[in-house]
Image (tube, rainbow, N blue to C red):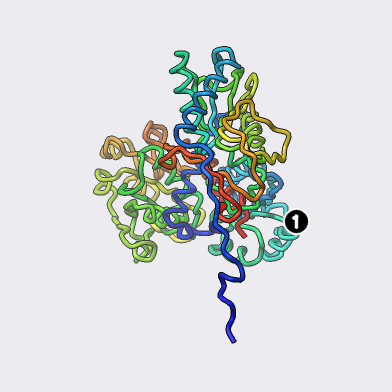
Amino acid sequence: MIRHLLSGADLDADTATQILDTAEEMAAVAGREVKKLPALRGRTVVNLFYEDSTRTRISFEAAAKRLSADVINFSAKGSSVAKGESLKDTALTLQAMGADAVVVRHPASGAPHRLADWVDGSVVNAGDGTHEHPTQALLDAYTMRSRLGRLAGLSVAVVGDVLHSRVARSNVLLLSTLGAKVTLVGPPTLIPVDIAAALAPGTGVCYDLDTVLPSSDVVMMLRVQRERMSDSYFPSAREYARRYGLDGPRMARLPEHAIVMHPGPMNRGMEITPEVADSSRSTIVEQVANGVSVRMAVLYLLLGGNNR
Amino acid sequence: MAYPPAAQSSPPRQPSVKVILTSADVQRVVDRIAHQILEKTQGAADTVLLGIPTRGAPLARRLAARISAFEDISVPVGVLDITLYRDDLRRHATRAVGPTQLPAGGIDGMRVVLVDDVLFSGRTVRAALDALGDLGRPASVQLAVLVDRGHRQLPIRADYVGKNIPTALAESVKVTLAETDGVDEVRLYGEEAGR
């Protein structure tokens, strides 16, 4: 069993499938009278968040609590980090407190990898810069599998700001491991040259959304990350929405069974219209619920046994 | 000067394997437990059979089939995976979690009969009792096992026992069933060939 979950590439097909299968059992807990399992009693999970996050932090917190772990929430605001403490010193503090797992979100790409060298516990990457967000990819894969029944052979279009998207990177890595065919779609300024070949061979790139839609089983809309954009990557928000936004007429071009995903938070009217976001094809709310089950599975598989 | 041949110094002990129950025996034992359940529960009304994986699950299904053959009553059957409730999770590499399937009617207010193949330390049953408590509130819980081999480490006993097998701690009991292993049999392995 793996010790850390830092990248979508850490998971081979068997391990990823095991996580998805375990998540299915964990999902059953949500429907029970007592929504709690004793598997991680006495373990401590630290949520170390250097970046704002609502759903990921709450999702990890709910997952750890449902497994009976103790949860310590640490956000950079209002902590010693504001006084200038380094990541390493913070890591050593957590280490001294006996953290069995550290769930870390950091604006710097690669921060969780560094952290993994400094602490004895397991490190889970909850999003680092513009690099990776593996648990999001797992919950997306879980959502696709539960809606469409399989992953192998699916055509998945990942649309939008690929350049800044950790969700896109982790998804490409994980989905291609699991046999899906991913096509990255967006304006050329937001799709790095050679990214497809660098991440996973077989990944396609297309600059025109309309040609991809009729053959897609899944359309994953990415958020346009205005906070990470210092330069202008496209002329105007309206033009972006016109060319790469998913609206009703575009959705109608999808095959009957196709689903629409979005990792949230959405810019309604920018990359996705409310009509699409609230349609029955949209899995956006499901993705949040599935996130808890998948993170329970990840925490259980990392911490449940003696994997040292 | 030569070393004496190895066989002379210590003759290899034969690993002892003893068949305790044959296929026909297992069938008879299952039939008897089915009758006992019917007798003790006065017709098996409001009763649910929950098998503990791996081999408790097919045993529970067989018991339900026999009960319905004898008395024409359909007893709900489920599967109770106890992995997440084990007390030795941290002593081993992470164990895979199996499915738990409760009958549609649930277990609230029902008489739950837990079904397992071998009763040994009693720790599995303790875990199952904990799991049941999180799933609902049964009216009562009973335990049916194919084999009781003794050496309890907890104050737990079975209500229905297929066969009591006195064993030494170093011996091991292996139950195989047609559904999971291709053949119905209970074997006792000596100290050598265990697990």
Out of A1 and B113, give the one closest to the viewer.
B113
As drawn, A59 above or below A131: above
The answer to whether A2 appears left or right of A75 in the picture is: left
Taking the spot 57% from the left edge, 59% from the top edge, the residue there is B13
Q: How many badges with numbers are in the image?
A: 1
Taking the spot 33% from the left edge, 49% from the top edge, the residue there is A152
Q: Quadrant of residue A150?
A: top left
Out of B182 and A31, give the one closest to the viewer.
B182
Q: Position of residue B150 (x, y in %)?
A: 67, 39
- Residue where numbered disc 1 is placed: A97
Q: Secondary structure at mark 1?
A: loop
Is residue A289 visible to us here? no
The answer to whether A260 appears left or right of A133 in the picture is: left
Quarter of the image where the N terminus of chain B is located: bottom right
Out of A143 and B100, give the one closest to the viewer.
B100
The answer to whether B135 appears left or right of A11 in the picture is: right
Residue type at mark 1 is Met
Q: Chain of mark 1?
A: A
Q: Position of residue A33 (x, y in %)?
A: 61, 27
